[in-house]
């Protein structure tokens, strides 16, 4: 059995279907205020276009005005709830960012105060060191003189040992 696509043209649309089953719902232009609904059904196993069974049902109904109003109100209500949720979440995100920025700013202020205190203490230490520098220079000079005096004492000790050795040598004679 050959199964070719069946081509059905309805209003402004063209449909292709493969048997055995096919259906479509097409909204066509209509001269009346209500849209025309055309339902096409292709049933059964067919091998050619001529064998296809096409049924057309036209229905023109308009939903009740109260139903549309109720549905619109429901949609708008739910959309408003959704948008309020999105806006609330975004607002909360911005509040969180604002709080984080405030805390970061406070931490940076604390760090600035610490840095200012360290800088002030360093200046004070440098001033004290500058005030002590003459005394440190005197200590260094005294240390150098003490080292020179110690060397002189060693030389004097060595010379006195030589003299003592010569004196003992002369005494033995």
Image (spheres, rainbow, N blue to C red):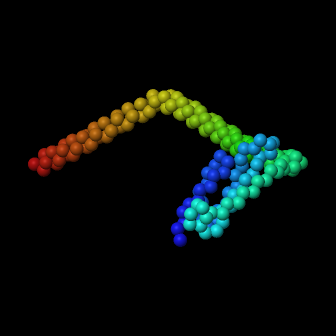
Whether residue 139 is visible here, answered yes or no, is yes
Q: Dividing the picture into quarters, in which one does residue 146 lie?
A: top left
The spot of residue 103 in percent (x, y) is: 68, 41
Residue 123 at what x, y percent from top left?
Answer: 54, 30
Q: In this view, does 166 lie to the left or right of 79?
A: left
Residue at 64% from the left image edge and 40% from the top image edge: 104
- Between 53 and 37, the one lying in front of the other is 53
| Residue located 87% across and 49% down the image | 64
Front-lying residue, 20 or 117: 20
How far from the left and from the top, in percent, is residue 92? 73, 44
Q: Name the side, left or right, on which 30 lies relative to 17.
A: right
The residue lying furthest to the left in this view is 173
Residue positioned most to the bottom:
1
Q: From this viewpoint, is residue 160 visible?
A: no
Image label count:
0
Residue at the far right: name it.
66
User: Foreground residue, 25 or 169?
Assistant: 25
Closest to the observer, 10 or 138: 10
Residue 142 x, y percent position in the rendering? 39, 34
Identified at 21% across, 41% down, the residue is 159
Instruction: Kindly identify the residue that appears in the image at 58 percent across and 31 percent down.
Output: 120
31, above or below 39, in the image: above
Q: Which quadrant holds residue 157?
A: top left
């Amino acid at each position: 059995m050959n199964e070719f696509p069946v081509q059905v043209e309805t209003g402004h649309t063209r449909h292709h279907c493969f048997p055995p089953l096919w259906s479509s719902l097409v909204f066509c232009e209509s001269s009346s205020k209500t849209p025309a609904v055309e339902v096409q059904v292709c049933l059964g196993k067919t091998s050619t276009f001529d064998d296809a069974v096409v049924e057309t049902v036209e229905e023109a109904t308009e939903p009740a005005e109260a139903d549309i109003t109720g549905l619109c109100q429901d949609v708008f209500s739910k959309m408003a709830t959704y948008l309020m949720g999105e806006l609330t979440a975004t607002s909360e995100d911005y509040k969180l960012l604002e709080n984080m920025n405030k805390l970061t700013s406070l931490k940076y202020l604390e760090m600035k105060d610490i840095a200012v205190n360290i800088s002030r203490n360093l200046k004070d230490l440098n001033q004290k060191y500058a005030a002590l520098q003459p005394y440190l220079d005197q200590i260094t000079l005294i240390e150098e003189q003490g080292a020179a005096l110690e060397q002189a004492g060693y030389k004097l000790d060595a010379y006195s040992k030589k003299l003592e050795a010569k004196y003992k040598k002369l005494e033995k004679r």
